[in-house]
Amino acid sequence: MNLLEEKQPDCPTDKNTCPLQDRIRRLEEKCKELEALSQVDALTGFFNYRYLMNALEQEMERTRRTGVPASLIMGDLDYFKRINDTYGHENGNLVLKTTAGIWRSNLRRIDIPCRYGGEEFVFILPGTRLPQAIQTAERLRRSLEKSPLSLDGKPIVLTGSFGVTGIVQDQDMTSGSIIETADQLVLRAKSNGRNRVCYDTYSSIAESTGVRDEEKNLLLGTDRPTKQKR
């Protein structure tokens, strides 16, 4: 018999002395737990797609109201299908969980890590200009590359390709188009050799975000690896 099926005693006028209060609190706590679980990807512990879209809409609205910029990073594991085909899906899941742990440790507490689907991840960075978001993406890229994983006794070097785009006040974009922009930048990173970060050209960034001189120097000095032979 569950809580709702139990015979409920009559409740007195004073709710503080009501014998149902403990049961009500337990139900409320259980509802909160279920709500939290419904927003999280069970494998990686990152937020799921539904939470991502809601959070992105909220950050876009915050930027529209306050003018404070935000940024979005999309990351895609390189050659993940090859890992699945070679080592099996259980090891593929281990790669995803390991990657999520590495990346989580390289984010701020206010950042919003989400699993977009498969081996694709999206990170919403509140209050973050594009140059700093590019730095964050580079940190995610390097941290993954420097954390080899052993699968079936063989060391595997994991890498990822990243696309970074900004969210600014006067931008005429939807949440869907922002994600599409980041996705296209990931495809550019893949086509240029993988294991790299791609972003809009400096001229378009300057026009849309008003990049300061120090940010310009940061952008132009961003570490971008040379094309690798695979």
Image: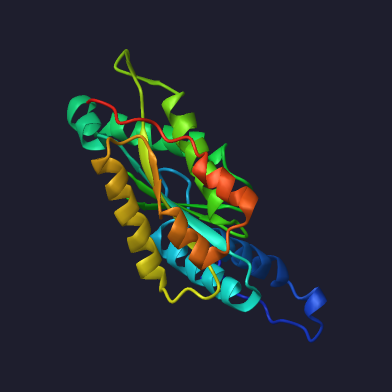
Q: Residue at x 36, y 37 (%)?
A: 160
Q: Quadrant of residue 96?
A: top left
Report x, y in % for residue 43: 40, 43
Of all residues shown, which one is farthest toward the left?
85
Q: Is residue 85 left or right of residue 68?
A: left
Task: Determine the residue positioned at 22% across, 33% down.
Answer: 84
Q: Position of residue 77 (x, y in %)?
A: 33, 39
Picture layout, residue 93 above or below residue 7: above
The residue sitting at the bottom extreme is 13
Please indicate, yes or no, whether residue 2 appears anywhere in the rendered image.
no
Residue at position x 67%, y 77% in the image: 9
Q: As drawn, is 91 to the left or to the right of 174?
A: left
Task: Please state which of residues 6 and 84 is positioned toward the viewer in this rendering.
Answer: 84
Front in this rendered view, residue 40 or 184: 184
* Front-most of residues 15 and 182: 182
Relative image position of residue 41 (x, y in whole percent): 42, 51
Q: Is residue 184 left or right of residue 178?
A: left
In the picture as drawn, the residue positioned furthest to the top comes out as 153
In the depicted structure, whether residue 214 falls above or below residue 195: below
Coloring applied to the structure:
rainbow
Asked if 57 appears above or below 12 in the picture, the reply is above
Instruction: Determine if residue 217 is in view.
Output: yes
Residue name at image x 30 percent, y 55 percent: 184
The quadrant in which the C terminus is found is: top left
Measuring from the top left, give residue 141's x and y in whole percent.
Answer: 44, 35
